[in-house]
Image: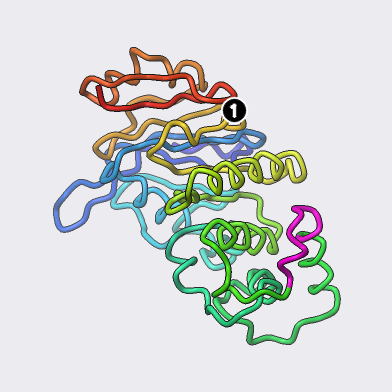
Amino acid sequence: MISTTEKTIIELDNVCFNRQDKAILKNIQWTINQGQHWALLGLNGSGKSSIINILTGYHFPSSGQVKVLDQLFGVSSIPDLQKRIGIVSARINQEIPSHLSVLDTIISGKFASLGLYQNVTDSLIQEAEDLLDTFNFAAFRNRRMATLSQGERQTVLILRALMTQPELLILDEPTSGLDLFARESLLAMLDKLAKEKPEVTQLMVTHHTEEIIPLYQKICLLKDGEIFAKGDRPLMLDPDRLHDFYGQPVLLRTFKKGRILVMPK
C-alpha cells in the first residue's frame, strides 16, 4: 500500500496500464521525493508517454495506486491537482495560437488555457515580466509566437508552465526538434531554473542520455513498459547497465560536463 506518512511528489504503487488488452505498463513501482530531480529514460514505445498521461490525470491506471503531490487518484480532485503541475510537451507547443505574443502566452499559463480569454490584472503582467527578466528573455516580450524559433518557443512554454507556481514540472522531451545550440541553451535554462526555483521538482523525459545533465541525479530506465532499473545517476549510467538496457551493442562516450553519449556500435 502507498504510504500516507512520508511526503512525496510522486508515488506509483504496482501501476499497470492496458489498452485494448495490450499491457502498456507493467507493475510500475516508483517514488520521487521532494528535493529530487529525475530523468525518465526510454526508447520510443517504452511507455514513457503513458506514465506522463497517468501522472497528469489524463489516463487512469488499469490497476495499482497513483499518488501525486499527496493526492490519491480516485479520491482527490484531478482538475485541482493539474493546476499544481506544470508540463511542457509537443502537444501544447502545437496548440498554442501563433498570433499570441510571448507575454500573453506566458500569462495564459495562469489559467491553464491555450489562449487568453480572461481579464488580465497588472499583477499578472508583472509576474510574467518577472519571469522574462529572471531568464533573460525580456527582449522577446512582444514578439508573436509565430516568429519564434523552436528553441525560443520551448523557453516560452517553460515560463508559461511556471506561471501556476507548480510544485512539479514535467518536461516531456523538451529538446525534441531543437538544433545542437538550441538544445544546449534550453538545458542550461533548466539548470538555472533549479537554482532559481529549488522548490519545483523537475521530471525530464527523454530517450537521449546526453540530455541528462548533472542536475538530474536520479534516473529511471523504462523498457517495454517495465522499470528496468532506477536509482542514482552514476549507477544508472554505468556502461554495463546501459549495454544490458539497450540489449544490443552500443558505444559510450563521455560528453560535456559529465554527460554520457550512447551510440549504436
Quarter of the image for the C terminus: give it: top left
Residue 23 in picture, x, y percent from top left: 20, 46
Residue 135 highlighted magenta (yes or no): yes
Say which residue appears at 42% left-offset and 19% top-offset: 253
Q: Which residue is found at the position 66% from the left and 45% from the top?
A: 189
Horizontal side, residue 59 vs residue 72: left or right: left
Q: Which residue is mark 1?
A: 214
Q: Give the colour scheme of this rendering.
A: rainbow
Residue at (80%, 66%) from the top-left corner?
129
Residue 176 in the image: above or below residue 160: above
Instruction: Pick whichever, 182 or 172, lies toward us.
Output: 182
Residue numbers of the magenta segment: 132-141
Left or right placement of residue 160 versus residue 183 in this view: right
- Residue 202 picture quarter: top right
Image coordinates of residue 198 in percent, x first then y, are 73, 41
Q: Amino acid at mark 1?
A: Pro
Q: In the image, residue 168 lies at what x, y percent? A: 60, 49
Give above or below for 125 relative to 240: below
Mark 1 surroundings: few (<14), some (14-19) or many (≥20) residues within 10 A: few
